[in-house]
Amino acid sequence: MVTNNKKVVMIAVATTAAVIVVLASVIAITTPQGSSSNRTSPTSESINGQPLQDTSVEERLRIMTTFYPLYEFAKAVVGARADVDLFIPSGLEPHDWEPSARDLERLRDYHILIYNSATFEPYIDKVKGLGYDDLRMVEAAHGIMLEQDPHVWLDPILAKEQVKIILDVVTSMDEGNSKYYADNAKAYTARLDELHAKFEEGLRDCERREFITLHAAYHYLASRYGLEQITIAGIEPEHDIPAGKIREIVDLAREHGINVVYAEEGIDDRLVRALAEEINAMVLILSPIEVLDEEDLEEGKTYITKMEENLENLRQGLGCR
């Protein structure tokens, strides 16, 4: 039975090659903005082996999640006994997206809004000011996030903590299904433990520990597995590149023998490719898993499979055995 708790829980160097300098100064890394009218939530037959629909439940929690990893975590917990939707349209970059008035109005139909943090979704302050007393807002990075880096989900151990936060709120609002939710959460966190073990083993014996990426999204992952990220841009991938930054990265790459530069899906990679050409490196993908596009969803990809792809690309770039 759904219980309405009328309480809001405020739970990104000039180089010897002039072309790179030019690219660093002129490339605006952008992503498309989208209309909510075309929004669909990710579809799959199951997550955690659970069917996604159970029409036998008369009154169900309705949960809105702000971006893909939280959607998967919530769906893994509630399985067939609650409805989970995705606030941002599939394929759009969460750092840039702003909800429309229509998007905000849709939230009236939900019991819970699960977001990562006000740093990652700054529009949350706008939502808090709407006066939706029956909408319980849950900050899934509460007590986990360090400083201004919101990308906690890229560490499987911290992802487990986010699952626990989601479990706590859904059980408090739907106590009748608490055992079902707890069992689902236990099964999914076991899969996160397996993912963590794969990263530990896969990154244990490598030629180098440093990697170059466009976007400063990998602090938590790097810290967990004894790596060092060298970033071109800042926390947000579209930030301007400071003068001299590319030269610094070129020098670091040569010092550490780095022969891979990591780009991201959906983000302009011209600067990454110019840098890779300067240091004679290849370009691979390292996904922050902020979004799954339609192709990913059609192929049945998930947070866990995307993390496994990241592991394989890290192993290649770090020269792991």
Image (spheres, rainbow, N blue to C red):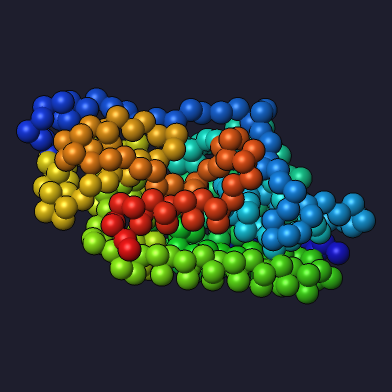
Residue 174, compared with residue 72, is above or below; it is below
Between residue 121 and residue 133, name the one nearer to us. 121
Residue that appears at 10% across and 30% down: 17
How many numbered discs, if any? 0
Residue 7: image quadrant is bottom right
Residue that appears at 59% across and 67% down: 191
Q: Quadrant of the N terminus?
A: bottom right
Q: Residue farthest to the front?
A: 321
Question: Residue 60: horizontal and vertical position, in percent?
Answer: 83, 56
Between residue 224 and residue 64, name the one nearer to us. 224
Between residue 204 and residue 21, name the one nearer to us. 204
Question: Residue 179: horizontal and vertical position, in percent?
Answer: 78, 74
Residue that appears at 81% across and 59% down: 81
Between residue 286 and residue 246, name the one nearer to us. 286
The answer, for residue 169, to whether it is visible in the render is no
Residue 106: image quadrant is top right
124 sits left or right of 318 in the view: right
Residue 242, compared with residue 253, is above or below; it is above
Question: Residue 12: horizontal and vertical position, in percent?
Answer: 30, 44
137 sits left or right of 284 in the view: right
266 sits left or right of 109 in the view: left
